[in-house]
Amino acid sequence: MGVGRRLAAAVVLTAGAVLVSGCGLGAQQAGPVALAGAPAPGRAATPAVTINVTPVSRVLAAEPFVAPHGTLRFGAKGVTVKVLQARLRELGYMPGKIDSRYGGTTQSAVWAFQKVQGISPTSTVNSRTWRALEAPKAPQVLVPTGKPDRVEVNLTKQIAVLYRAGQVKLITHISSGSGIPYCETATWQGKTQRFCGDARTPTGDFKTTWRRSGWHKSYLGQLYNPIFFNGGIALHGALSVPLAPASHGCVRLPMHVAQVLPSLLGTGVPVHVRGKFQR
């Protein structure tokens, strides 16, 4: 899963959708955002990114992985970080560029991996996480009878899994709707309006519909490379993707994941949303 270009910000948050989308930042945070490697608001994104993920089933059948010793923390550098990044990439997670630096993109992949393994997510990689990397569990299949190409969003674990041809292609950390009712005042279509909602990501079975490239603005803020699947609710990149649900209803993705997802996920692909986050 090579990433030709890496965004400088790793675990990231933009928000909003288009038209009358129910996901995004508050109006006070909806201004232009500058990201190294990311387009400015209103400018189409043309990321030259390729991704080649080895299906989990193939990895588990490969030569056993032997974990190194030691503890890694955010900000670490060196060969052990490179081993971690390579292993996460093998398993279908997205640590960003294999650069021996433990930054935000790697942290989001560690979080996703830990959540799938039943480990409380933390930026620290210790013996328990290393052992899990030696004998990893595959993510829980939410829809066993689902189409070979589909997305499964697990609200309980706050992860999303992309399947291609029945194989796990990508596993990512997400942040869904906070469930906290909101009312926002914003200027939309030339008028000052007040918008209220329940900040919930509805469960159910949907399909991907329309999308936009680069930053896209809505009445609640901005989102990056949105792929809509339920009215104004989308999978989209964000400049903050915290461990707890925090959006107005959309499914926030780390920016480096949102950068490549449009090339992997077509229109009309099933999106299954299940579960409920317990605070």
Image (cartoon, grey):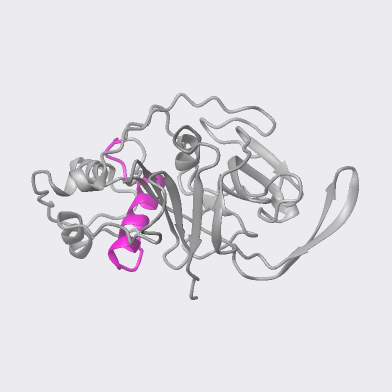
Image spot of residue 111 (x, y percent): 36, 57
| Vertical relation: 115 (above or below) 217 | below
Residue drawn at the location 35% of the way across and 59% of the way down? 141
Determine the image quadrant of residue 201.
bottom right
* Segment colored magenta: 98-122
Q: Quarter of the image containing the N terminus?
A: top left
In the rendered view, does 109 fall on the left or right side of 29? left
Residue 195 appears in the rendering: yes
| Vertical relation: 215 (above or below) 279 | above
Residue 213 on the magenta segment? no
Residue 80 appears in the rendering: no
Residue found at the far bottom of this picture: 279
In the rendered view, does 16 fall on the left or right side of 87? right
Residue found at the far front of this picture: 145
Image spot of residue 96 (x, y percent): 36, 39
Image spot of residue 35 (x, y percent): 56, 36
Residue drawn at the location 60% of the way across and 59% of the way down? 247
- How many numbered discs sit on the rendered protein? 0
Residue 102 on the magenta segment? yes
Question: Observer-nearest residue: 125 or 169?
Answer: 169
Question: Observer-nearest residue: 195 or 82?
Answer: 195
Image spot of residue 218 (x, y percent): 73, 46
In the rendered view, does 249 fall on the left or right side of 109? right
| Vertical relation: 238 (above or below) 140 | above
